[in-house]
Image (cartoon, rainbow, N blue to C red):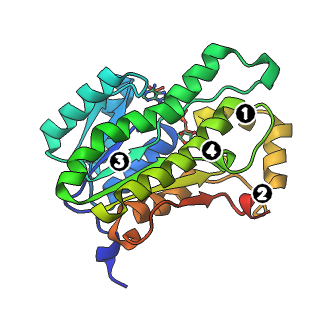
Amino acid sequence: MSTALFDLTGKTAMVTGGTRGLGEVSAMALAKAGADVAVCGRSQEDLDRVSAAISDLGGRSRGFFLDVTSKESIRKGVDEILQQFGKIDILVNNAGVNHRVPVLEFPEDMWDLIISTNLKGYFLVTQAVVPQMLERGYGKVINMGSILGTVALPMQAAYASSKGGVHQLTKVMALEWAKQGITVNAIGPTYFETELVSQIRNDPERFNFINERTPMGRWGYPSELEGIVIFLAAHASDFITGQTIHIDGGWTAW
Ligand SMILES: NC(=O)c1ccc[n+]([C@@H]2O[C@H](COP(=O)([O-])OP(=O)(O)OC[C@H]3O[C@@H](n4cnc5c(N)ncnc54)[C@H](OP(=O)(O)O)[C@@H]3O)[C@@H](O)[C@H]2O)c1
C-alpha cells in the first residue's frame, strides 16, 4: 500500500469549530498527515492553543476568528485564510451546537441558533470556500454529520433536523461538483466525549443507555475519528462522494 494515498503534504485544510472537541481532533489529524491547517473558531485563547499544538508537530498553522452564523465573519475569515495560505484544498465543516428539550418546549430562538450554526453555517462556509476549489479543479469537503442525522432520539428536534439536513446537503453538493474534482462527504459520529455531550456523559443513566444501545458497547474515543478524517481528505477517497460514513460502533446497523 502506498502511503501517498494518505499523505496531505502541500495541502491546506480549514476546520470550523477547530478549537476543541472533534474539530480539534480533526485539525490535529490533518496536520499529522502533513497538511497546513487554518483553525477556525471564536475563542482567541483556544485558537492560539490549537494552532500552537499543530506548529509543535512541525506543521504550519494559524487561528482565524470565524463565526459560522455570520456571513460577514465567514467572508472575512475565508479571505484572511486565502491571503495567508493561498488556497484551501480541504474544508471540514464541523462547528456545532445542541439543546435537548421536548418538541413542545423547544424555544424558537434555540431552534434558530442550532439550524443556523449546524446547517446554514455549513452551507454558507462551503459557498465561500468552494469557488477557489473549482478554479483549481480540486477539493475535499467533509461535513460533520451525526448518527442523529440518520436515526433519531427524543429531545433532539433541532439537532437531528440539522444533521439530517447536513447529510442531504452533502449529497446535493456532491452531485453538483462531481465532474469538477471536488468530493463532498459526511462523517456520522455516535457519542464521543466532548463538551457538547458532557451533560449526557455526566448522567449515569443516559451514559449507560448509549453503551447498551451500541453494538460495540461503548462511546467513541475522540482519537478514533482521526482515520476517517484523513481518509476523506486524502487521495485514498478520490472516487467516494455524496456519502455519510457513520463512525458509531455499529449503532446505525441495527
Ligand atoms: N461529540 C459528539 O458526541 C458528537 C457526535 C456526533 C456529531 N458531533 C458533531 O461534531 C461537531 C463537533 O462537536 P463537538 O462534540 O466537538 O462539540 P464541542 O466540543 O462543543 O465543540 C464545538 C465547536 O464548535 C464551535 N462553534 C460553535 N458555534 C460556533 C459558531 N457560531 N461559529 C464558529 N464556531 C462555533 C465551538 O467553538 P466556540 O468555542 O467558539 O463555541 C467549538 O469549537 C458538531 O458538528 C457536532 O454536532 C459530535
Of labels 3 and 4, the one closer to you: 4
Q: Which residue is mark 3?
A: 91
Residue at mark 3 to residue at mark 4: CA–CA distance: 19 Å
The N terminus sits in image quarter? bottom left
Name the kind of residue labelled 4 in the image. Answer: Gly
| Contact (Cβ within 8 Å) of mark 1 with mark 2 | no
Name the secondary structure under disc 2.
loop
- Residue nearest the observer in this picture, 154 or 210: 154
- Residue drawn at (58%, 42%) of the image: 165
Q: Residue furthest bottom?
A: 1
- Residue drawn at (38%, 52%) of the image: 141
Name the kind of residue labelled 2 in the image. Answer: Thr
**Pointer 2 or 4: first along the chain:** 4
Q: Give how far across and how far down residue 196 sits, in percent.
A: 61, 33
Q: Which residue is mark 4?
A: 164
Dividing the picture into quadrants, the one containing residue 31 is bottom left
| Contact (Cβ within 8 Å) of mark 3 with mark 1 | no
Dividing the picture into quadrants, the one containing residue 81 is top left
Residue at mark 4 to residue at mark 1: CA–CA distance: 11 Å
Residue at mark 2 to residue at mark 4: CA–CA distance: 20 Å
Q: Which residue is mark 1?
A: 156
Disc 1 residue crowd, few under 14, some 14–19, many 20+, Cα 10 Å: some
